[in-house]
Amino acid sequence: WNEDGKPVLKYSHSDSIQRVVFNPATDTLASCTNSDFGLWSPTEKQVAKYKVQSKILSASWSNDGQFLALGMFSGQITIRDRKGNEKVSIAREAPVWCLSWSPWNDESFDLLAVGCWDQTLSFYQLSGIQHQKDRKLGFNPCSINYYGQGEYMLIGGSNKEAWLCTKEGAKLCVIDNRDEWVWAVKCRPKHNAIALGDHGGGIAVINLQFQTVHGLYKERYAYREHMTDVIVQHLLTDQKVRIKCRDYVKKVAVFRDRLAVQLPDRIHIYDLANHDDSYDMHYRIKERIHQTLPCNLLVVTTNNIVLCQERKLQLLDFHGAMVREWILASVIRYIKVDGGKAGSEGVLVGLKDGQILKIYVDNAFPIELIKQSSSIKCLDISVDRKRLAVVDNDNRILVYDLATKEIVFQESNANCVAFNTELGDMLSYSGNGTLAIKTGNFPVSTQKLQGFVVGFRGSKLFCLQYLTMKTIDVPQTASLVRYVEAKDFNAAYQIACLGVTEEDWKVLGLAALKALELEVTRKAFVRIRDMKFIELVNSIEARLTAANGDEQDLEKAKGLCQAEICAWSGDYQEAAKAYARMGEVEKAINLFVDLRQWDEAKVFAAGNSTIDNKDLTRRQAEWAEETNDWKKAAEMFLSSGDPLRACRIIGENKGKGWQETMIDVVRNIPKSEVEVLKLCGKFYSDSDEDSYAKEVYVKLDDFSNLMQLYIRKENWVDATRLADEHEGKFDKSVFLPYAEWLAVQDRFDAALEAYRKAGRPDQSERMMTELTSNAVVEGRFKDASYYYSLLGTEILKGMKLTKDLKKNEKHLKQYEEYMKRADWYYAYSSIHNFCNDPFTSLQPEMLFQVSRFLINSMGQIDAPPGISRVNTLYTLAKQAKVLGAFKLARFAYDRLQQLKVPGTWEDNIDLDVLTIQAKPVRDNPELAPVCYRCGSTNPLLNPFSNQNTVGDKCTNCGHPFIRSYVNFDILPLVEFFPNPDISDEEALEIIRTHDKDAGKKKGKDWEESKRGEADVMTFGDEDDDNDWGGGGGADKFEMAINKTLETQDGSGAYKPVLVSAKVLASLKRDTVYVCKPVIDGMRYRFYKNMIPDISVALSQPCHRFFNEEDFEFVYLRDGCCPYSRSKDVGDYGPL
């Protein structure tokens, strides 16, 4: 059926149905009969049925719905899974009419309770293992059900009773008696209602109410849990200990280290293991009284227990023997142990007739304390035994003074009361959801609180809310303040001892100090460990003791003490006034100085002539410095005439606008304040304030620091300008960091100049050497050439020329070596590009000339690092084959076969070697170079090149070939020098002012002659003499060449052409090129263009020649000389 009462499904069994149970986790329904059981689920179309061997009497699903337990008439218990498969089978000797799974979650396993008609109750785990021994019931159980969360069990059966038992099956109480067997007992979920049905068809519903069984003594609270356990809780530490009694707990009582627990047939007495430890929670059994002792109330003392039965009190020892008995006039309503000596404890007893008695356990006669008309509901006595608080049946609280028997306080709407166990003047009571606290004679303070007040200790209030004991912190500040305002410092101290904050202790201490209650003050500040106030109390006490003999001195001492107390309390104005009244104005001023209240200090100082206002100003400045108010501190120090300290404060703090503030100081102080100015300059320099630092150093005329400033900030422009303006005032080393900075910026030319100024040519040479090495390693051969040329130039610029040539020979040779390597690397750059680049725009003629130049220049010496002979020969062979120099190509390939070539070239070279064999064994004669000095035709490769003689020069006369450093063609230039008696300047002047008709022959006589292998034509001159420079109509320069060739002994003894003044005068300016010396002291180098129609360009920075058209094209394209990279090449034409 559904919730609306409409049928959903109908299915049948062949036998009568005994049990129907729904799965608590799913919608599965189990129906049980005499012979089988079925499982129906909404997700299944058919009902699955399973046969059993005996009649099913009981059934129960496990809490997770995974297993179904079936009890049978044969005594067998079978546990099935959700699909009906048997998991466990348990055999009993009698029919199993009831069983139930335990919902208790604290167990680590599922537990099945089984009621068998052998009058036993047994428990089994899911695995079939029995959990504990069978418990004898004395009747046949017909129904078993768990109550609540599984902490209790309900059992009904043939004894016609319904029992409430523990979850272990121990009987607690009888819920109901019936006239017939009880066949069903069930609890309403989440309620205390119990429903039961008997064999006669009767149904009853019973509400269970669990009484609170508990006991309290100071901070120890004992209460019953689960009817069979006793929990002892320490209310201050919240520690708990559980004592398992395994039986119905009827009464609990606690007193000091004793704990009494009453069970149905016995009383257990426990004591603490450690009696001296107030926080010990380890209880151990002390005695057992095996007697059934009915009672209404139970309390315990150190050596006895007290039982209350209506009007009768019985005192028993721990062995159960009766010690004493009291029969009172009325029914006992309330009983409480009031403490006392062991064996002589007092017991407070409240009767129904309003009488309150105090009974000592060792005294047979009760003592009447109070007699009132209303019945007693609750009572308590103060810790000092001076007051008694009573709550009567009218919910009134009455507080009696036990000495006068008078009511000192009463209030309504109270249901319980408790005195503070540490302070007799404080009590609390509750009622109608309100908590009230009464302290002394002050008004009651209230707050909302649900529950019952059962104890009050210190600042902790113990309140029972339903079944839970709560510990509430009660603030004592209000009570403390009231006592302080009433000047009752001893009572205030007692309140503070209950538990107040550190600030409250300080309030109490200060108030007592102002009242000169020094003992209370000392105790208060000792509590919070405030050593400064403790020392103050000691000093005040000593001062008062010292002045105790004289009344006037005592009054003054008290006045000074009050002033000091006001100062320590923060009432500074009153303190200062008190000092002034006592004639101690200086102390008042020092007080305000310490407080940095300068205006107040000046007010008091104005009326006293002994105080120096300037000293106050200085102290105020020091305070401003301490508080980082640098501007105010600086102003004050300046006004006091201390600019040095003012500037130091400004510079060290560097607050907003400090630069302008300091520069104002600099501009206003005289130049004689050197120390101040230097300090300001240092602060500005360290803070990158260059303009201000410069102004300071200029005012000081401190050019050394100014130069250091420029160098540190890398302000090289100003640094060099300063060095030029004040030459001689600085060490040359100032240029060294400038040079290093330039080198980092790749400005190597400027770096060389800076190194030169710094007097460190070694550094410039090191830099250039490293640059050259890196360029070679990285394959930047033009860069390597450029760096070598710079190295050579630097060598020349770094040496000093003298008349002794031997001293310069080393440097000159090094210069020539560097320049030669520069030429090689410059030339090899083209070969490297040809061999490594996939495409090249280089012409075969250029590569051919470059290869020849390198091979002729290097000869047989070891090639410099980076230059490959293989690449050079390979390039030469390739271009020679293209240009028709087949003989030279064969030579190059033969040399290549003797060297190790790259693997990718081998097949190509082998093919070229084969194909070159088909070519004629000669070179194209047009490729042969001609010497423009002697007119000889030279072979393509110098046959005399070896390890001793190398060079790209004429094989006949030894004259070096002058090449164009763009395409490396040989230029028609011949080198010459003026006669030694003619200076370079005179030679230049002669050439510039020559006669245009000079050098032309006036006559027509001429003759032919043979000089060596050369054919020579000589023209006559009317004034022919031995001066080879003075020939008449013949070309005087040709005659000078011929003269030199006649005197020269072969190509190995090369001599430059020397010309006289007449020859110089015969030269045309547009055919003469002059290389200016790199440094002073070196001679000019002169060259004559033998074919003026071929235009030649000369780059003065590097002394290298070019075809004019090629040079102009490259210069316009790159903006610099292709060799020296100089942007200013000067006049690159002839003289």
Image: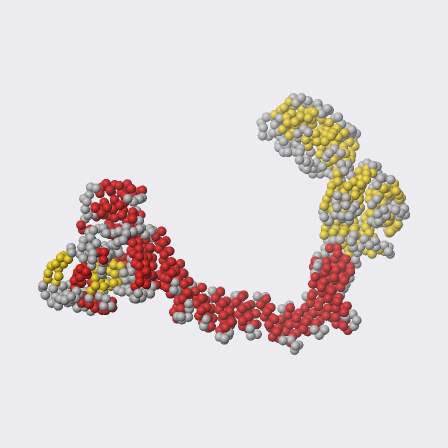
Q: Nearer the viewer, residue 3 or 594?
A: 594
Tell me: 527 left or right of 989: right
Residue 417 picture location, percent across and down:
79, 50
Q: Nearer the viewer, residue 445 or 1070?
A: 1070
**Residue at point 72%, 56% (across, down):** 500
- Asked where in the image residue 644 lies, by quadrant, the reply is bottom right
**Residue at point 21%, 67% (across, down):** 991
**Residue at point 19%, 66% (across, down):** 1060
Residue 896 picture location, percent across and down:
27, 45
What kind of colouring is applied to the model shown? Answer: secondary structure
Tell me: 791 left or right of 388: left
Where the C terminus falls, by quadrant? bottom left
Tell me: 861 left or right of 374: left
Give the residue furthest to the right. Answer: 365
Q: Nearer the viewer, residue 661 or 352?
A: 661
Residue 354 picture location, percent across and down:
86, 49
Instruction: In the rendered view, tell whether residue 337 sits above or below residue 589.
Output: above
Residue 304 picture location, percent across and down:
84, 43
Can residue 992 be seen here? The reply is: no
- Asked where in the image residue 975 lies, by quadrant, the reply is bottom left
Give the residue furthest to the bottom. Answer: 609
Where the N terminus falls, by quadrant? top right
Can residue 169 be seen here? The reply is: yes
- Asked where in the image residue 1069 lies, by quadrant, the reply is bottom left
Instruction: In the rendered view, tell whether residue 165 sits above or below residue 271.
Output: above
Instruction: In the rendered view, tell whether residue 433 sits above or below residue 66.
Output: below
**Residue at point 38%, 58% (across, down):** 766
